[in-house]
Image: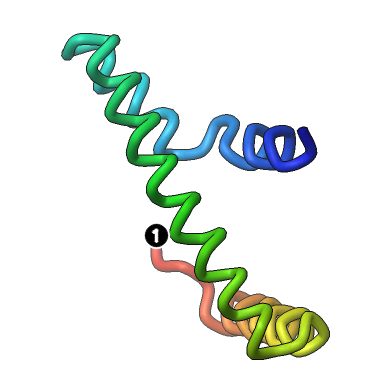
Amino acid sequence: MQSFVLTFLAEWGDRSQIATIALATHKNALGVATGATIGHTICTSVAVVGGSMLASRISQRSVATVGGLLFLGFSLSSYFYPPLD
């Protein structure tokens, strides 16, 4: 139940959902829903298997540290190099 809620909330309103809505307005909605479900299932399955494999090789603390450093690095990069208009 927790993974369902987290995935649902993370995906709500993202660009892929907007693209799926746009595609469903021009194509068969059942086909779009089926394709989107299969695509999301494959993508999530790869993430779960990959995460499981990574968890057996590196610690959760290392992942959190690297993720935090990347977040700080990207925020500094955005501060010093703002997006072009």
Residue 62 in sight in this render: yes
Q: How crowded is mark 1: few (under 14 residues within 10 Å), some or many (20 or more)?
A: few
Total numbered labels: 1
In the picture, measured across the screen, residue 84 lies left or right of residue 73, that is: left
**Of residues 76 and 10, the one drawn nearer to the viewer in this rendering:** 10
**Residue 77 location in percent, x, y?**
58, 83
| 5 in relation to 58, above or below | above
- For disc 1, the marked residue is 85
| Residue plotted at (47% across, 52% down) | 45
Type of colouring: rainbow
Q: Residue at x 79, y 39 (%)?
A: 2
The amino acid on which the numbered mark 1 sits, given as a three-letter code, is Asp
Q: Is residue 14 above or below residue 35?
A: below
Left or right: 49 in relation to 58: left
Q: Residue 30 is drawn in which quadrant?
A: top left
Spot occupied by residue 68 in the image (x, y as percentages of width and height)? 75, 80
**Residue located at (68% from left, 89% from top):** 58
Residue at 77% x, 33% y: name it.
1
Instruction: Give the position of the C terminus as an image quadrant.
Output: bottom left
Query: Residue 16's image quarter?
Result: top left
Say whether residue 30 is left or right of residue 59. left
Q: Is residue 30 above or below residue 77?
A: above
Out of 51 and 13, give the one closest to the viewer: 51
Q: Is residue 76 visible?
A: no
Q: Is mark 1 on a helix, strand or loop?
A: loop
Q: Quadrant of residue 36?
A: top left
Q: Residue 50, percent across and down?
A: 51, 70
Which residue is situated farthest in the left direction here?
27
Q: Where is residue 9 in the image (x, y as percent from the top left)?
A: 68, 35
